[in-house]
Image (cartoon, rainbow, N blue to C red):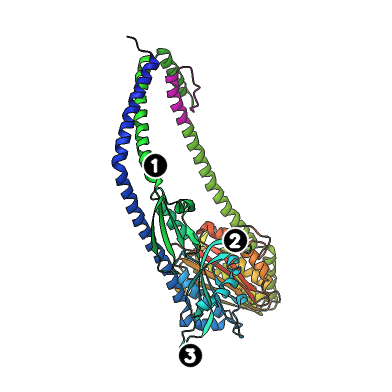
């Protein structure tokens, strides 16, 4: 009896479907209990592991807070906050940097001092790191909570940070009222110490464990509100009762960590496995049937079409998409070939884009170098120096003229070098030559360079300090009297330069705008030196070192300015 082709296909697929369904039902009954026990054990295990990681991070933050603020040396330094010297502030920065530069969990350190009347003074708060706006906006919250009855004994506490409109920020803060531990003033209330850390670090831990098991989610609560949750947490699932949950109490802040597994995922996990098996078997069977039909129905015309089309490519320099014909089996081959052609073209496009990106980076570096040279060696500077040199010669001051020529030669040799980088020693030597040239013009300006010689061989980007120093001469010390200090501090992962002047200073609104634009990589109309933008200096730092390099400005109107350049030097 001749069987219709459609009947043949239908009978094969029905038989395959029945076999798969029987296998699916039997396997589901057998494996459901095992799957339930497996997800329960995994939920318990992952919740305990999250608990260990949270406690580790919170203990680390709490320990750092105690080490930083409950420290006799630090408490001695706080006495210098209201003095006219910058040394106390710089030493506090060094104290903060010693701990925070080696810990990527903590973002900011803040100390709010008490003034002479014993009132917490938020306006003179000392803040370390960059991105200060969101910290400033919460200083009043820190003060209010620290002076509440519950925390007057110096107990550390947790708080969220908020925007002016009340919206939560993605940051937490560990706050404590600092208690004096020095024998002469033991247990007196001092200022408020704050460590700010990113809540996303905790969210990442929850998300990483939640992703390890479909249907698993986490949340942390203090009993009144959720502190942090995993990305997939659903409140409705938790209250619906169709879940298994594991609750543990953290050792910090009386937080509760809850791991929640949605039981509907037990069924879906089993179903997905067997459906996938069914699909694979269907595809395998269908492929076998298709292959048999292909072998049976293949015609010479189809083979000729493919042969002639591929033969054309042997004579051409590039391959192209093949148009499809009427034969279904041949079209399957053509479709696969066309997908390959598209993949090759996509790969070529990606390689071209990558090459263009590399060229663009090289051009940007050249552009920054040219901008830097334009600022550093401009005609006004050269004319002024040559005029001073001529006056030395006319006045018979040949020794000073000789020294001026030597300094100018050293400065131009460094500035015109094509190298992108140099050592700290070379950079400070060039800076010293530049300062000698400038002080020959402005003898009433005192200059000072501080750096340990043991760090002179460390490599850094070249010519990054001179534009900042020139800004101090041109804008900070317009009266041509005062002092400029260049301080270099080296830590395991960073080289930090401080360029300090006691000149006119900058008002706080402009300082906030400068630091905001530097943080967000925005160009600003506020310039330094002879036109090179702060943005360009920071971008060149990051281009030649790392995105972890940074730059920010500290200033008080009428007191002076500090420009801080942090150069990342690797792990």
Q: Nearer the viewer, mark 1 or mark 3?
A: 1
Q: What element carries label 2?
A: loop
Q: Which of 74 and 153 is in front in this view?
A: 153
Instruction: Point out the tag, 3 or 2, that comes first from the N-terminus.
Output: 2
Give percent across and percent down for residue 402: 61, 74
Q: Pick whichever, 261 or 303, lies toward us.
A: 261
Q: Which numbered marker is on residue 184?
A: 3
Give, as a single range, the part of the protein colored magenta.
Answer: 317-341
Q: From the image, which quarter does the N terminus lie in? A: top left
Residue 527 x, y percent position in the rendering: 67, 63
Q: Mark 2 points at which residue?
A: 167
Give the CA distance from mark 3 to mark 2. 43 Å
Q: Which of marks 1 and 3 is nearer the N terminus?
A: 3
Q: Judging from the image, what secondary structure is the residue with disc 3 in?
A: helix
Contact, mark 1 vs mark 3 (Cβ under 8 Å): no
How would you rate the neighbour count of disc 1 (Cα within 10 Å): few for under 14, some for 14-19, many for 20 or more? few
Q: Is residue 381 left or right of residue 206?
A: right
């Amino acid at each position: 009896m001749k069987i219709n082709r459609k009947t043949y296909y239908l009978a094969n697929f029905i038989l395959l479907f029945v076999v798969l369904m029987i296998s699916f039902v039997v396997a589901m009954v057998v494996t459901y209990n095992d799957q339930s026990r497996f997800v329960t054990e995994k939920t318990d295990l992952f919740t305990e592991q999250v608990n260990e990681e949270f406690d580790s991070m919170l203990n680390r933050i709490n320990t750092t807070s105690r080490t930083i603020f409950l420290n006799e040396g630090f408490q001695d330094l706080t006495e210098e906050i209201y003095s006219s010297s910058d040394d106390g502030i710089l030493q506090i920065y060094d104290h903060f940097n010693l701990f925070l530069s080696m810990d990527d969990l903590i973002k900011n350190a803040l100390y709010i001092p008490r003034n002479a009347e014993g009132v917490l003074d938020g306006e003179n708060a000392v803040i370390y790191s960059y991105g200060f706006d969101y910290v400033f906006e919460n200083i009043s919250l820190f003060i209010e909570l620290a002076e509440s009855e519950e925390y007057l004994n110096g107990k550390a506490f947790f708080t969220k940070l908020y925007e002016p409109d009340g919206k939560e920020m993605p940051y937490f803060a560990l706050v404590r009222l600092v208690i004096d531990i020095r024998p002469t003033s033991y247990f007196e209330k001092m200022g408020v110490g704050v460590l700010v850390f990113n809540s996303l670090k905790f969210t990442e831990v929850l998300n990483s464990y939640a992703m390890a098991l479909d249907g698993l989610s986490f949340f942390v609560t203090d009993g009144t509100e959720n502190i942090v949750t995993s990305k997939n947490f659903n409140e409705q699932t938790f209250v619906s009762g169709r879940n298994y949950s594991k609750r543990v109490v953290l050792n910090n802040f009386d937080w509760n960590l809850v791991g929640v597994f949605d039981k509907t995922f037990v069924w879906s996990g089993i179903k997905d496995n067997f459906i996938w098996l069914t699909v694979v078997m269907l595809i395998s069977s269908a492929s076998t049937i298709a292959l048999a039909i292909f072998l049976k129905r293949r015609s010479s015309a189809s083979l000729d079409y493919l042969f002639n089309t591929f033969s054309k490519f042997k004579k051409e320099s590039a391959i192209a998409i093949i148009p499809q014909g009427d034969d279904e089996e041949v079209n399957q081959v053509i479709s696969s070939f066309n997908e390959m052609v598209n993949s090759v073209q996509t790969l070529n496009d990606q390689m071209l884009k990558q090459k263009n990106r590399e060229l663009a980076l090289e051009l940007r570096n050249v552009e920054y170098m040219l901008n830097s040279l334009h600022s550093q060696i401009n005609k006004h500077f050269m004319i002024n120096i040559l005029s001073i040199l001529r006056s030395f010669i006319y006045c018979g001051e040949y020794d000073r003229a000789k020294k001026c020529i030597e300094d100018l030669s050293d400065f131009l040799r460094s500035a015109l070098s094509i190298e992108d980088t140099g050592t700290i020693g070379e950079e400070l030597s060039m800076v010293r030559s530049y300062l000698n040239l400038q002080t020959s013009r402005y003898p009433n300006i005192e200059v000072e360079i501080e750096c340990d010689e043991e760090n002179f061989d460390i490599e850094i980007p070249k010519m990054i300090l001179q534009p900042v120093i020139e800004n101090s001469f041109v804008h900070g010390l317009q009266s041509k009297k005062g002092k400029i200090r260049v301080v270099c501090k080296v830590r395991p992962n960073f080289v930090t330069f401080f360029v300090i002047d006691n000149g006119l200073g900058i008002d706080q609104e402009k300082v906030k705008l400068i630091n905001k634009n530097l943080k967000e990589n925005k160009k600003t109309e506020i310039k330094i030196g002879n036109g090179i933008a702060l943005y360009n200096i920071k971008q060149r730092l990051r281009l030649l070192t790392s995105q972890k390099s940074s730059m920010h400005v500290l200033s008080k109107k009428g007191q002076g300015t500090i420009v801080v350049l942090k150069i990342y030097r690797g792990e």
